[in-house]
Amino acid sequence: MPRVTEREARRVAEEAREQDWRKPSFAKELFLGRFRLDLIHPHPLPEPESARRGEEFLARLREFCETGIDGALIEREARIPDEVVKGLQELGVFGMKIDPEYQGLGLSQLYYNRALALIGSVSPAIGALVSAHQSIGVPQPLKQFGTAEQKERFLARCARTDISAFLLTEPDVGSDPARLATAAVPTGAGDAYLLDGVKLWTTNGVVADLLVVMARVPRSEGHRGGITAFVVEADSPGVTVERRNSFMGLRGLENGVTRFHQVLVPAANRIGEEGSGLRIALTTLNTGRLSLPAMCAGTGKWCLKIAREWTAAREQWGRPIAGHEAVAAKVAYIAATTFALEAVLDLSSQMADEDRNDIRIEAALAKLYASEAGWRIADELVQIRGAAATRPRSRWRRAASGRYRPSRCCGTCGSTGSSRAPPRSCTC
């Protein structure tokens, strides 16, 4: 692993950043003490045709989410069923941001993020699968920096059949790219690179067909060198998924450790010039960061649904707990914060579509705010549910979502119970 000084680490990171501000930025102006309301007012709105196509797609996606996805099953078995992935592919979910000329849906950033919010409200693991594939995986870098030939070769595959992943992080190398150790050494003929190294936290990497890999090209005659981006076929000789990582949450996440040993990558698979990989990654994240606020907004809506149903059904001191001020304040906080999350998401997404403003800072602020607010929303819901929030999912716990009516058993043994818990004597 390269040993670098603090100065060198900062230099590598700073050189990869976009330095110019060719468009105005509402958030930047706020930092400078100027409130430029004209940059966001009137509130930008989608084009009528874009809205029509987006709403039609959301209607189809909502039906599939309600009938074809069992989020609890995914968390319980730590795996997204193959039939769910196939159903998403048939709907075009993996090609939401890919242009129709490459068999994608060509949705706007606004409707892409609304779709992620919807998916995330059913299964955050699927939300992560879809967003990693399109926001930072092969489609987005190729859309912005790929050649016409690369787009023809890969985008249709990503839209319909293939899953992609983004591989940057390495063991002991997180946000410090100057220490990146994975190497891509040019071959003698100069028409390919030999890839060697290990990548960690490879979201989608366990099941991916295509990989975007960041590797360091050594400086040599005819090669400027530096961190460079490559599209790598996951079934190439020398590519090994060493393990699938396990997590406390997002148990269906296909995240692992991938090793490359003398993997031959054609020079035609290089994205951009040598040394531009980190800049490509950071530029891709300008809109890619909005995926997290999208899923946080979806999580907030789900939490609000559960909180309202539970506080209306659960009684203490002679009335539903929703009528007690302390609980009501928590529900109000969840509702208000979820509204704010969606408002921030919609404005940032529409600003990205409008392409009139630079949204680098807006996207970063949205991600920071949404991740912190989403955590507080979840914490408030756990407090509202009390001990029931920490129990394994059961028929009694599903009472909050209206899928279990516990005043009677399922009808076989004839036992009866209270309106808030299944009968103890029920053996069904």
Image (cartoon, rainbow, N blue to C red):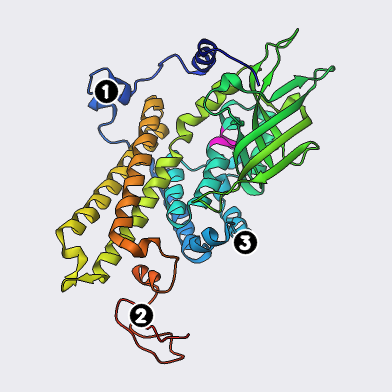
Of marks 1 and 3, which one's residue comes earlier in the chain?
1
Q: CA distance from mark 2 to mark 1?
A: 53 Å
Counting labels gives 3
Disc 2 element: loop
- The reply to whether dot 1 and dot 3 touch (C-beta < 8 Å) is no
Q: CA distance from mark 2 to mark 3?
A: 32 Å
Q: Is residue 108 magenta?
A: no
Location of residue 121 with respect to 273 vertically, above or below? below
In the rendered structure, which segment of residues is drawn in magenta? 136-140
Residue type pointed to by label 3: Glu
Location of residue 99 with respect to 271 vertically, above or below? below
Label 3: which residue?
A: 83
As drawn, the residue found furthest toward the top would be 221
Residue positioned 20% across, 64% down in the render = 322
**What label sits on residue 30 in the rendered view?**
1
Disc 1 element: helix
Of marks 2 and 1, which one's residue comes earlier in the chain?
1
**What label sits on residue 406 in the rendered view?**
2
- Identify which residue, 425 or 57, lies in the foreground: 425
Drawn side of residue 107 relative to residue 268, left or right: left
Q: Is residue 139 magenta?
A: yes
Location of residue 379 with respect to 234 vertically, above or below? below
- Identify which residue, 33 or 78, lies in the foreground: 78
Quadrant for residue 172, please give it: top right
Location of residue 332 with respect to 392 vertically, above or below? above
Residue positioned 17% across, 71% down in the render = 319
- The residue mark sitting in front, 2 or 3, is 2
Residue positioned 27% across, 51% down in the render = 334
- The residue mark sitting in front, 2 or 1, is 2
Quadrant for residue 317, please give it: bottom left
